[in-house]
Image (cartoon, rainbow, N blue to C red):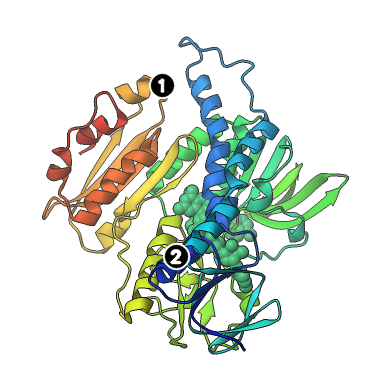
Amino acid sequence: MEEIYDLIVIGAGMAGVTAANKCGAAGWRVAIVDALPYGGTCALRGCDPKKILRRGAEIVDAAQLMQGKGIDPHGLTINWSDLMAHKRGFTDPVPDKMEKGLTGNGVETLHGAARFTGTNTLEVDGKPYEARRFLVAAGAMPRPVRFDGADLMIDSTEFLNLKALPKRILFVGGGFVSFEFAHIAARAGAAPVIVDRGPRPLRAFDPDLVEMMIERSARIGVELQRETEIVSVAENGGVFTVEVTSGGQARTIETDLVVHGAGRIAALADLNLEAAGVTYGDKGIAVAPHLQSTANSAIFAAGDSADTGGMPLTPVAVIEGKVAASNMLKDAQVAPDYAGIPTAVFTVPELARVGLLEAEAKEAGHDVDVRFTDTGGWYSNYRIGETSAAAKILVDKSDGKILGAHMFGPEYGELINFFGLAIKLGLTAKQLRSMTAVYPSVGSDLGSLL
Ligand SMILES: Cc1cc2nc3c(=O)[nH]c(=O)nc-3n(C[C@H](O)[C@H](O)[C@H](O)COP(=O)(O)OP(=O)(O)OC[C@H]3O[C@@H](n4cnc5c(N)ncnc54)[C@H](O)[C@@H]3O)c2cc1C
Ligand SMILES: NC(=O)c1ccc[n+]([C@@H]2O[C@H](COP(=O)([O-])OP(=O)(O)OC[C@H]3O[C@@H](n4cnc5c(N)ncnc54)[C@H](O)[C@@H]3O)[C@@H](O)[C@H]2O)c1
């Protein structure tokens, strides 16, 4: 064993890099390790590349909405390999940039798979390291699913690297990944089918708006099969036969590609956490509210591999990375503030949420004023030819504060941010309405939604 580090961070995604930079800049002796190129899921295999591919879908959809209104969408197609090259123009430089940023903050960058060997020791590809503190920021991986032929599915990373898009695509599970990818694929000419075992997908979103989004998805050729279980997948000459059951009836679906969209679990299996005496499960390492392991005080966790009150999202990974670093540096016990963190499913148009769902607000005992507005006929949607859009704003009748905001429509993934700020700062609907927005802009619809 050579030197003892103040901190070793496992995982160079948003949580790990945020924490390593902060502790390195504060003068700690820090090392960070990743088995893959630096950048993590969001920048290399998630949010950012996904939204670049979505740009193609946005353009096709925008033209289709304006058909008969001065735009001829016929002949407008997505060139998949050019769009992929555009994506790589962003992703390729990420690892180098990120590593340089870390080195600039005095952080030592290691490459390889980390594995604990004791309560404060680990090895990276067989080489031993010792530290006073560890941050586990190992992210998440596709949830292992148990049906015959499950290994024939591709995962989200492989989808985002597809060389060509086949015509028929079946998505297993009706969550973020499946709906976002299906919306991209449909605009690129594919016929996507989403198979979900539950009665209603996207349970973290407002049920009325989810149904509106499903109806809009059907109009662009995305088929949803609810309460349907996958029994098996078999492949023959590049064609997949997916056996499913619904309502006790078995049937088969033929497709050209099967994509895993059945959820993700914390990627902890290879870390040998038993050697470190750490408690963990599918949601991540069991941590106290201030992100320190409940079983080994040397270990903190953040992001998708920490079992916290935050959703597995990039802004949460960043906040937790910052808070974990600050708690380690100051020997403090501050808990992250998750209030007002918005999230969006980047279908076209998008479905967004911040704060409480209507059912959650009522269960929590709030006297809720539910302000639902179908905005399909509003000027900002008329202008672009969109007819499917709505918002549901939840206001506490007792004090006028915003409890939650739920939106489905073009640019609502931007508009939701105002509601996030209002919730974080505890603003009332009246205070939020006092904002003057650029006119005409989607932001200028905000006042009328309240
Ligand atoms: C397809 C997709 C789209 C998404 N889109 C969005 C979006 O639009 N908005 C949003 O907010 N969130 C989105 N997410 C979620 C978001 O990407 C994650 O919440 C976020 O990236 C988590 O960051 P993290 O730092 O916790 O983990 P990660 O970024 O996953 O980083 C973990 C790193 O740890 C490394 N690692 C793991 N185990 C070891 C080991 N033993 N040794 C060495 N290294 C190891 C991994 O290689 C990885 O690089 C998306 C996720 C996916 C899959
Ligand atoms: N825009 C974003 O912010 C974004 C995008 C993608 C992913 N993510 C993050 O990644 C996480 C994982 O996303 P995801 O889409 O993989 O999962 P998810 O948890 O959003 O949805 C998974 C769905 O699959 C269903 N399911 C599970 N097993 C099944 C099976 N065997 N057969 C049929 N259906 C099955 C579940 O009932 C659920 O509806 C998300 O929770 C989110 O935090 C975020």
Percent of width and height locating residue 29: 47, 77
Task: Identify the residue at horizontal 27%, vertical 62% (top origin).
Answer: 363
Tell me: 196 left or right of 238: left
Q: Which of the 4 quarters of the picture holds residue 329?
A: bottom left
In the figure, 312 relative to 115: above or below? above
Q: Quadrant of ligand 2?
A: bottom right
Percent of width and height locating residue 76: 61, 19
Circle nearer the N terminus (1, 2): 2
Q: Give the Cα separation between the discs numbered 1 and 2.
A: 43 Å
Task: Identify the residue at horizontal 53%, vertical 21% (top origin).
Answer: 64
Q: Is residue 225 visible?
A: no
Task: Identify the residue at horizontal 48%, vertical 42% (top origin).
Answer: 346
In the figure, 429 relative to 123: above or below? above
Type of amino acid at the residue the image marks with label 1: Ile
Residue marked by disc 2? 21
In the figure, 208 relative to 299: above or below? above
Residue marked by disc 1? 384
Task: Identify the residue at horizontal 38%, vertical 66% (top origin).
Answer: 322
Q: Which of the 4 quarters of the picture holds residue 277?
A: bottom right
* Number of numbered discs on residues: 2
Crowding at dot 1, Cα within 10 Å, few <14 / some 14-19 / many 20+, comes out as some
Crowding at dot 2, Cα within 10 Å, few <14 / some 14-19 / many 20+, comes out as many
Type of amino acid at the residue the image marks with label 2: Asn
